[in-house]
């Protein structure tokens, strides 16, 4: 088994940031469309070709402004459009994993929200199939209890739709205010067929995630030992304030303990 590491984003350096990742021995990178989808199909293809040359696995984080269960239908349509546009860019990038935060519960029943998310994931998958885009939707575990995206929901969604899952271990820690059994998380994550992961330091309170922090060595080592123990082969994207430095740190710790 193997685990590969990389940063969320390119530090604003575009292709040069990709080259820097390769020079550091990193084999993964997440293109951050979190605030805007800033690449054209043409520039995405160019970026993807460089990534392929360096053997770097790409993913995309779709825009933050997504709620597949909004009370306002135009916002649902806009959310699906943002995800599908990310999928189109992902196809040209050669990025398999399209990561996004799917929805908010609001005041509605969680089961109802699940069924709506499922319906829209299936609709988007039909569009992906029609367009022959080589990507996979990967809704992400979220860091607040107000957001759709606990691991059980997403595992069930993956089983019922064939989508992938992005397991953000830091988000799960924040979502449950540190009260989480990571042995159980690993048992569930191992069953997910299409898996990508995030990990970084995180600050949280009673309501969940506040902000990402530099990743502590002891936390990296603890996570990697669990992944190795459960034989989970994956890619880990770091979203800390120093994603390149923390990814290199993670790689060194992994090489030491694997």
Image (cartoon, rainbow, N blue to C red):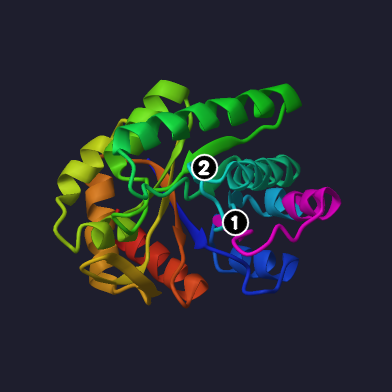
What percent of the width, then of the height, locates residue 2? 40, 45
Quarter holding residue 76: top right
Seen as rendered, the residue at the extreme right is 42
Residue bounds of the magenta highlight? 28-49
- Secondary structure of residue under mark 1: loop
Seen from the viewer's position, the closer of residues 175 and 145 is 145
Q: CA distance from mark 2 to mark 1?
A: 13 Å
Task: Name the residue tied to disc 1.
Answer: 63
Q: Quadrant of the N terminus?
A: top left
Dot in front, 2 or 1? 2
Position in image of residue 84 (x %, y %) = 67, 40
- Is residue 189 in view from this perspective? no
Rendered position, 89 above or below 216: above
Asked if residue 254 shows in the view, the reply is yes
Q: Are marks 2 and 1 in contact (CB under 8 Å)?
A: no
Q: Is residue 205 above or below residue 198?
A: below
Q: Is 84 drawn above or below residue 3 in the view shown?
A: above
Q: Name the disc covering residue 216, or none.
A: none
Q: Which mark is residue 68?
A: 2
């Amino acid at each position: 088994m193997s685990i590969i590491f990389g940063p969320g984003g390119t530090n604003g350096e575009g292709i040069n940031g990709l080259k820097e990742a390769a020079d550091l021995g990193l084999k993964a990178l997440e293109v951050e469309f979190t605030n805007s989808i800033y690449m054209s199909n043409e520039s995405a293809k160019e970026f993807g070709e460089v990534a392929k040359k360096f053997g770097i696995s790409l993913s995309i984080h779709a825009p933050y402004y997504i709620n597949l269960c909004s009370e306002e239908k135009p916002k649902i349509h806009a959310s699906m459009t943002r995800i599908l546009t990310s999928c189109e860019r992902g196809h040209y990038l050669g990025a398999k994993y399209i990561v996004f935060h799917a929805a908010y519960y609001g005041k509605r029943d969680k089961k109802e929200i699940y069924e709506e998310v499922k319906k829209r994931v299936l609709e988007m998958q039909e569009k992906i199939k029609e367009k022959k885009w080589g990507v996979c939707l990967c809704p992400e575990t979220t860091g607040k209890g107000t957001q759709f995206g606990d691991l059980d929901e997403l595992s069930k969604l993956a089983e019922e739709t064939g989508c992938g899952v992005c397991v953000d271990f830091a988000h799960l820690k924040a979502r449950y205010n540190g009260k989480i059994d990571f042995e159980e998380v690993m048992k569930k994550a191992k069953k997910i067929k299409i898996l990508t992961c995030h990990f970084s330091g995180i600050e949280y309170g009673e309501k969940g995630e506040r902000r990402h922090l530099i990743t502590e060595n002891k936390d990296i080592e603890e996570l990697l030992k669990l992944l190795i123990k459960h034989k989970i082969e994956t890619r880990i994207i770091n979203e800390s304030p120093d994603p390149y430095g923390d990814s290199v740190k993670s790689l060194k710790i992994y090489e030491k303990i694997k």
